[in-house]
């Protein structure tokens, strides 16, 4: 039996073919597009909704690290963050959850939350714990690294598991306006095209709901010192100038807020209006 929640018939309206955005249907151990007839395999309960040939070289390179060392990722984050920035992982993640404005979610219907680059699921429990009474959440996660995703069920043992898919955040396999909250924490600076990923997050978010993105950026007011600066450079080796990608937001982004989640991480929040 799969360790991941299955994609059921009820989910199909939410999914869209990553190649043509056509509707998807089940066909044995695959999802098949009703538009372009592309076939997307499901292996071990995990739908693979991307084409390897279309993954950008930079994303392939970064995936080597995530696939190679998934067991180290979460312990390394927990141990390194206080050393580099003097602020714990828990304190760094708190403003992210606050920025999602979960208290504003409706209680009269299940709400959908999407976390792109979900990794091993470090934010899932935090979101569930912060949900106000009466809110029912349908949590979706997406990641390009199957190594990271395989760690997720074990890490979340005893917690509600999100429905996860293996896909590229540059081509989200979801219908336009499908989610009540969309967020991404870490790794965006290593993407081949961060602007494209932001546009995709904006597309799948319901108009007027917050989209939240967090990644490395040194707070200009933070007196890091040589050692901390060297460590920051080492963990962001793939990005010469780690910064909030405000200049890469999609046209029409409103209510833009860019600040620090912590001394080493920016928090960028925006909304989109009605899309054509
Ligand atoms: C720094 S980790 C953060 C994981 C998790 N969000 C957290 O807060 O602990 C970045 C994640 O983004 C994923 N990722 C990198 N490039 C991606 C892409 N193009 N599409 C989807 N996920 C990607 C990585 O595989 C990794 O799991």
Image: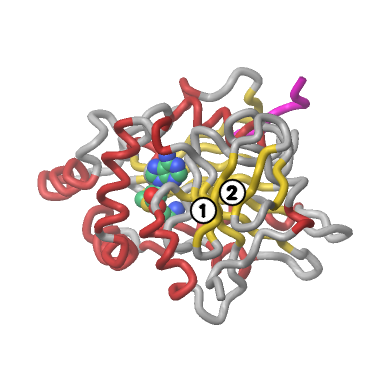
In this picture, is 32 found above or below 76? Answer: above
Residue range in magenta is 270-276
Q: Quadrant for residue 254, please give it.
A: top right
Task: Give whichever of 142, 112 is nearer the camera.
Answer: 142
From the viewer's perspective, tell me whether residue 126 is left or right of residue 243. right
Residue furthest to the front in view is: 28
Q: Quadrant of the N terminus?
A: bottom right
Q: Secondary structure at mark 2?
A: helix
Q: Relative to the observer, which residue lies in front, 112 or 48?
A: 48
Eyeballing the image, is 211 above or below 47?
Answer: above
Quarter the C terminus occupies: top right
Question: Contact, CB < 8 Å: mark 1 with mark 2?
Answer: yes
Viewer-side residue, 262 vs 113? 113
Whether the residue carrying mark 1 lies under 8 Å from ligand 1 is answered with no
Residue that label 1 marks: 95
Residue at numbered disc 2: 99
């Amino acid at each position: 039996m799969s360790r991941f929640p299955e994609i059921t018939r009820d989910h199909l309206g939410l999914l869209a073919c990553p190649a043509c955005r056509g509707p998807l249907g089940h066909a044995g151990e695959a999802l098949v597009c009703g538009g372009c007839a592309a076939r997307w395999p499901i292996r071990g309960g995990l739908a693979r909704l991307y084409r390897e040939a279309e993954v950008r070289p930079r994303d392939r390179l970064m995936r080597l690290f995530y696939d190679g060392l998934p067991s180290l990722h979460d312990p390394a984050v927990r141990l390194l963050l206080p050393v580099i920035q003097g602020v714990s992982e828990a304190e760094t993640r708190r403003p992210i959850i606050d920025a999602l404005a979960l208290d504003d979610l409706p209680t009269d219907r299940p709400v959908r939350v999407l976390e792109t680059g979900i990794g091993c699921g470090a934010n899932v429990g935090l979101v569930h714990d912060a949900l106000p009474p009466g809110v029912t959440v349908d949590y979706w996660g997406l990641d390009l690294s199957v190594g990271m995703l395989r760690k997720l069920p074990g890490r979340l043992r005893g917690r509600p598991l999100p429905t996860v898919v293996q896909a590229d955040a540059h081509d989200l396999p979801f219908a336009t306006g499908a989610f009540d909250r969309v967020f991404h924490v870490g790794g965006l600076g290593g993407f081949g095209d961060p602007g494209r990923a932001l546009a995709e997050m904006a597309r799948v978010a319901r108009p007027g709901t917050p989209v939240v993105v967090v990644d490395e950026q040194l707070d200009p007011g933070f007196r890091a010192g040589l050692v901390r600066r060297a460590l920051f450079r080492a963990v962001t080796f793939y990005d010469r100038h780690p910064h909030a990608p405000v200049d890469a937001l999609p046209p029409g982004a409103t209510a833009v807020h860019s600040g620090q989640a912590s001394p080493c991480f920016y928090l960028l929040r925006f909304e989109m209006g009605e899309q054509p």
